[in-house]
Amino acid sequence: MDLDFTPAEETFRAQVRDWLAGHVPPRLPSMDTREGFEAHRAWEADLAAARLSVVSWPEEYGGRAASLMEWLIFEEEYWASGAPGRVSQNGIFLLAPTLFAFGTPEQRARLLPRMARAEDVWAQAWSEPEAGSDLAALTSRAVRVDGGWLLHGQKTWSSRAAFASHGFGLFRTSGSRHHGLTYFLFPLDGVLVRPIAQLDGTHGFAELFFDGVFVPDDMVLGEVGQGWKIAMATTSSERGLTLRSPGRFLATADRLVSLARDADPVLRDRAARCLIDAEAYRLHTFGAVMGELGATTSLGKVFWSELDVRMHTLAMELLGPAAASTPWFDGYLFSLAGPIYAGTNEIQRNIIAERVLGLPR
Ligand SMILES: Cc1cc2nc3c(=O)[nH]c(=O)nc-3n(C[C@H](O)[C@H](O)[C@H](O)COP(=O)(O)OP(=O)(O)OC[C@H]3O[C@@H](n4cnc5c(N)ncnc54)[C@H](O)[C@@H]3O)c2cc1C
């Protein structure tokens, strides 16, 4: 594998680095608060104005048609610069690839440019009170009416739905289990949104209640009844590199090594191990992008989520009680959710056992 970047890639890296150096704002409030959400949206608009919010998208939708390798470079520079988390991430990294694969040209033209500028911010609505790991058990349904559908049911654990403008999720239109599910896009203003308070005092998470919410036909993504297949494309983006690029773990590992510089050798050794693992994930991803490794998103998901917990746990040990007033603490709390969201790690291990290793069910 050739690990050298091309001159064009190096130029792109330098351009991104320069722009970020001049524009990254001081630390913003949590995007799971109203104030923080708006501040993060304003940052997304700045990125979009510089055509840096969605670099890998085609130019007609606000991107730069960057290659996958350039996108990974962008991510490395982005996270190394200390730039804010991406409030639009569920739209730009999860829904958008699904729209490129399954949406109509009209849907792409209508929805993507607004998403790129964070004028619309999208929330995911898969989970239900009785359907989490077993998503095919969902009971929310859509009933056919003239010109569209009426949505009924309840979704839960929808990240930032308390402030987002739109949602996407699966509703049953016929059949049972994986059959007869349809992928709907919907504005959240017709939906009853009930925020869920979190331990850290934020309340961006929400439950969504649908009581006959009308959705026109042009907000169905893909074919009616084909929602499961389309949703699996979205979840694989969430587990895989489009949402969890190596750049963010490498940036955390670099900071961890600085934090551990004067610590005792055992802790320094653990920090070094984290850096090695973050670098391994990076190289593994480059290999996957060049088509030289048969990476699967489930393997990557278990690896990055466990590495993130290890890195933040070590930071807590290094900082002691002082950690509570640093960004490391927020990062620590969030890292604990990594083995749960995007499909729990137990489920990923089942997938690895059955589909990668071919073990019996
Ligand atoms: C920070 C965060 C953000 C989230 N954001 C969203 C979002 O935006 N949109 C959304 O729709 N959902 C979201 N979720 C919900 C998330 O997808 C679910 O929590 C997750 O899929 C697990 O579902 P559950 O909570 O119902 O747990 P359950 O499915 O009830 O699982 C409970 C436990 O049993 C284990 N388990 C279940 N089945 C099996 C099995 N077959 N084999 C082995 N172990 C099993 C699980 O691993 C878990 O440990 C988010 C969750 C978190 C923590």
Image (cartoon, rainbow, N blue to C red):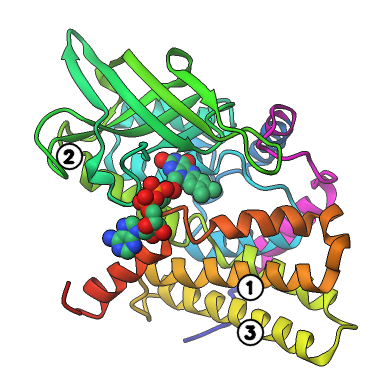
- Whole-percent x, y for residue 208 in the image: 43, 25
| Camera-side residue of 74 and 149 | 149
- Whole-percent x, y for residue 277 in the image: 59, 81
Horizontal arrangement in the rendering, residue 19 relative to residue 136 (left or right): right
Crowd around label 3: few <14 · some 14–19 · many ≥20 (10 Å): some
| Residue shown at the point (73%, 34%) measured from the top left | 36
Under mark 1, the amino acid is: Arg
Q: Is residue 31 magenta?
A: yes
Horizontal arrangement in the rendering, residue 308 relative to residue 123 (left or right): right
- Whole-percent x, y for residue 265 in the image: 81, 92
| Residue shown at the point (70%, 28%) measured from the top left | 38
User: In terms of secondary structure, where does tag 1 sit?
Assistant: helix
User: In terms of secondary structure, where does tag 3 sit?
Assistant: helix
Q: Which residue is mark 3?
A: 276
Under mark 3, the amino acid is: Ile
Give the magenta part as a residue range.
9-38
Tell me the tag on residue 310.
Answer: 1
| Residue shown at the point (64%, 37%) measured from the top left | 48
Gap between marks 3 and 2 measured at Cα: 42 Å
Q: Earlier in the sequence, mark 3 or mark 1?
A: 3
Q: Quadrant of the C terminus?
A: bottom left
Under mark 2, the amino acid is: Gln
**Disc 3, ligand 1: is the CB inside 8 Å?**
no
Horizontal arrangement in the rendering, residue 210 relative to residue 246 (left or right): left
Tell me the tag on residue 226.
Answer: 2
Q: Is residue 27 magenta?
A: yes
CB atoms at circles 3 and 1 under 8 Å apart?
A: no
